[in-house]
Amino acid sequence: MLNKKPDDIRDSEITDKHLYLNRRSFMRGAALAATTVGTGLLYRRLNPPPAETPKGEKFSGFAKPTSEAGLGAGFTVNEKLTPLEDIINYNNFYEFSTDKGSVASESKGFLTKPWTVSVEGLVNKPRTFDLDELLSFPLEERVYRLRCVEGWSMVIPWIGFPLARLLEEVEPTEQARYVAFQTLYDPKRMPNQRTGVLDWPYVEGLRLDEAKHPLTILATGLYGETLPPQDGAPIRLVVPWKYGFKSIKSIVKIQLGADEPPATWNIQAPNEYGFYSNVNPNVPHPRWSQARERRIGEFRMRETLMFNGYGEQVAHLYAGMDLKRYF
Ligand code: MTE
């Protein structure tokens, strides 16, 4: 990421096969949303997709989120999904490779069981959750835009649950103001951690109000399936109004604290990557503009939207802040 120019993006063509796959998966996702979301049995209950799309059927988007957090329009985008093939073959996951096209093969067979996530720090009820406990939170399907700081974007149908739900379980104390996240450190399983390309483990952070925002989810799947290793299995953060690098993968630890925690890319190059890293077309990266982006699978460039298009939901979190200073 550090050395790549934003235009250094593989041209990804949408073939008929891709469209077919996309459509089938879309149907599978829609069926899933209607049948199993909320049951926690997602991974054991996937049905084969319908053989054919009913003729003339219009796809109006996935089922609305089912949570009681007052979610509705604006939380799930109704845009053309990025083909699954692209989502799982074009990845940033430096623990496996710095080459986006090699992460899938390098992470193949990554062992995610057993897996635990400890939630600790300034909380009344610190606790270590094992994966099955996390998967028993009511799962929702959320279609989010993901905008990478490098200038490309995707539209991904995630499966997950609001981080707020997990935080409720541990009861943050009144002193807690930030949430820190940490990726697994295990060079045997994540071979690129043997190199010094980043300071390991990968760490990230959010302000507590950002972490509790209903848009912020922990994702455990995509396209109706278990999260593949290359996308951050078994559990990763997704914060859709921030650049993609805030969405830390393969999380093992979440720690609440009073002070702003360190964040990997901010440590690596503080003048290039701020703590907030809200998508902001008005604040260029020092080496390239952030005004436009390329949706993977498309050739044309799109205008990048403030807060990645989620301004209505999140702008209030930054009222009165100079976003050029707090970039
Ligand atoms: N998390 C970890 N642990 N390591 C990484 O290298 N890359 C980040 C983010 N999370 C990264 C990470 C970056 S730069 C992006 S753009 C997104 O993951 C990419 O997510 P995706 O591969 O699922 O599209």
Image (spheres, rainbow, N blue to C red):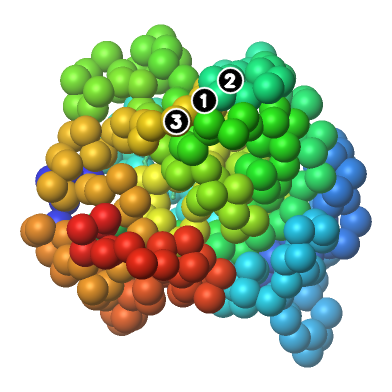
Horizontal arrangement in the rendering, residue 104 relative to residue 287 (left or right): right
The residue where tag 2 is placed is 120
Query: Measured from the top left, where is residue 9 in percent x and y?
Result: 25, 60
Q: Nearer the viewer, residue 25 or 327?
A: 327
Contact check, label 1 and label 2, Cβ < 8 Å: yes
Q: Which one is in front in this view, the residue at disc 2 or the one at disc 3?
A: 3
Q: Nearer the viewer, residue 174 or 179?
A: 174
Residue 80 sits in quarter: bottom right
The residue where tag 1 is placed is 255
Q: Nearer the viewer, residue 142 or 229?
A: 142
Q: Earlier in the sequence, mark 2 or mark 3?
A: 2
Q: Which one is in front in this view, the residue at disc 1 or the one at disc 3?
A: 3
Q: Nearer the viewer, residue 21 or 153?
A: 153
* Residue furthest out toward the bottom: 56
Q: Residue at x 21, y 58 (%)?
A: 325
Q: Residue at x 79, y 85 (%)?
A: 57
Q: Where is ligand 1, by quadrant?
A: top left
Kind of residue at disc 3: Ala
Q: What is the distance, in whole Å, between disc 2 and disc 3 at their CAs?
A: 13 Å
Kind of residue at disc 1: Gln
Queried on whether the Cβ of the residue with tag 2 lies below 8 angstroms from ligand 1, the answer reads no
Contact check, label 2 and label 3, Cβ < 8 Å: no
Query: Measured from the top left, where is residue 127 in percent x and y?
Result: 69, 18
Horizontal arrangement in the rendering, residue 325 relative to residue 222 (left or right): left
The residue where tag 3 is placed is 258
Element on which disc 1 rests: strand
Q: Quadrant of the N terminus?
A: top left
Q: Earlier in the sequence, mark 1 or mark 2?
A: 2
